[in-house]
Amino acid sequence: MTWGFRPLLRGSTYSGALFAFCAAPASLVLLPIAVVPATVWGSAPYGARAAVTVLLWAALVAALGLPRITRRALTAGARRLLAVPLPEVPAGPVGGGRWRTPLWLVAQVALGWIGGLGCLLLFVAGVSLPGNWLGGEARLSWSGRSVQVAGAWSWVVAAVCLLLVPVLCATVSGGLRRLALPLLGPSAAERLALSAERERRLAERNRLAHELHDSIGHTLTATTIQAAVAGEVLAADPAAARAALRSIEESTRAALEDLDYVLGVLREEQPGTAPARTLADLPELLERLGHAGAVLEPELSGELTRLQGTLSRAAYRILQEGLTNALRHGAGGPVEVRVAAGRELLELAVVNRTGAAPAVGTRAFPTSGHGLPGLAERIRLLNGEFEAGPDGSERWRLAVRLPVRWSA
């Protein structure tokens, strides 16, 4: 261990020492219980009775570390007062090593007594030596050897005693800091639990990112096109303009529901029920896009309503992303939408033209480049197959095959 003056200037050095010193007098509550065997065993030698008392006292102190709430309190104290970066351990049973917290508590009490009494003696000596010894003499004895201290030397000894107080505080804090991670840190099982929790949160954030991309991106694309259509036909066909504006209202209301849910999760609040858009909502989606001026040729077959929720929701988002890309990058003309639910496979396909002239309102759409990779990841998690690319000279085809598990 390399010592220097820097630890003596840290606030955590003295707050950590206080963390240990407070545990020492608190343990005195258990001392009356620990001395009971010594009083009963009155005929035993004094050394044996003292050893039994100390061991029982240590066992009682260690027993206080068995409840999980004690460990949480000690971990919070070490994190705040010792400035040790201990991670939060997820709730649940302790993953092995329950002996570590009792051992930490015994070490904290022992260091608290040693450091507290040592600092008290050094401080008393540093304050009292100059007043008692100035102009007089004193004798310091250690292991049969004596040193005569007189006059100005008492000031030197007093200064050394006072300087040793922060050094002893730094020693106690450093010892506790070294013990904190192995004794209060997570065990191997808890580290696995922490890693699993981090992976779960990352997967949840990725899922939310996909939801935002699919929902908000589609809504912005559709409403932009619908606004352009409404502006073009406002004078010639007011009914069509009103239909486009109603479609904008419906699209934005659905997107706001998705956005409220995602923001609630990100803020770690209790969000409402997640919007469950499934293949049952596909006709409404196609109708909104029809109001936007898109020409759709849907072909739906199979018992779509019997599909399980996760698969049906994923299929809806896949079709939504495919139609959004067709509106953004297509060249007008009909967009083919095919959904076929077989006994073992759910087949999805979106085919659009890719000529030189873009559709109405799609001329200046930027792209993030995350659409197709996000679709590929979503489909991979469902053990499906994914194809996207040119289909002939002027057509683009998105085709997806997902395994089906029918509900009873």
Image: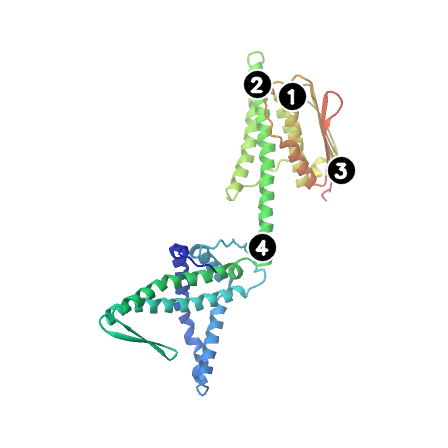
User: Is 163 above or below relative to 283?
Assistant: below
Specify whether 19 is left or right of 285.
left
Of marks 1 and 4, the one in the foreground: 4
Residue type highlighted by circle 3: Leu
Looking at the image, which is closer to me, 358 or 45? 45
Q: Position of residue 278 (x, y in %)?
A: 65, 35
Q: Which of the 4 image quadrants contains residue 121?
A: bottom left
Q: How many numbered marks appear?
A: 4
Badge number at residue 346: none
Disc 4/disc 3 C-alpha distance (Å): 40 Å
Residue shown at 64% from the left, 19% from the top: 359
Residue that lies at the very extreme toward the bottom in this rendered image: 43
Q: Are marks 4 and 3 in contact (CB under 8 Å)?
A: no
Which residue lies at the image location 45% right of the left edge and 65% below the top edge? 108
Q: Are marks 2 and 4 in contact (CB under 8 Å)?
A: no
**Which is nearer the N-term, disc 3 or disc 1?**
1
- Mark 4 or 3: in front is 4
Residue 50 can be seen, yes or no: yes
Q: Position of residue 366 (x, y in %)?
A: 59, 25
Q: Secondary structure at mark 1?
A: loop
- Whether pointer 1 and pointer 4 mark residues with C-beta atoms closer than 8 Å, the reply is no
The residue wearing badge 1 is 294
Q: Which mark is residue 191?
A: 4
**Residue type, mark 4 in image:** Arg
Of badges 2 and 4, the one in the foreground is: 4
Q: Amino acid at mark 1?
A: Ala
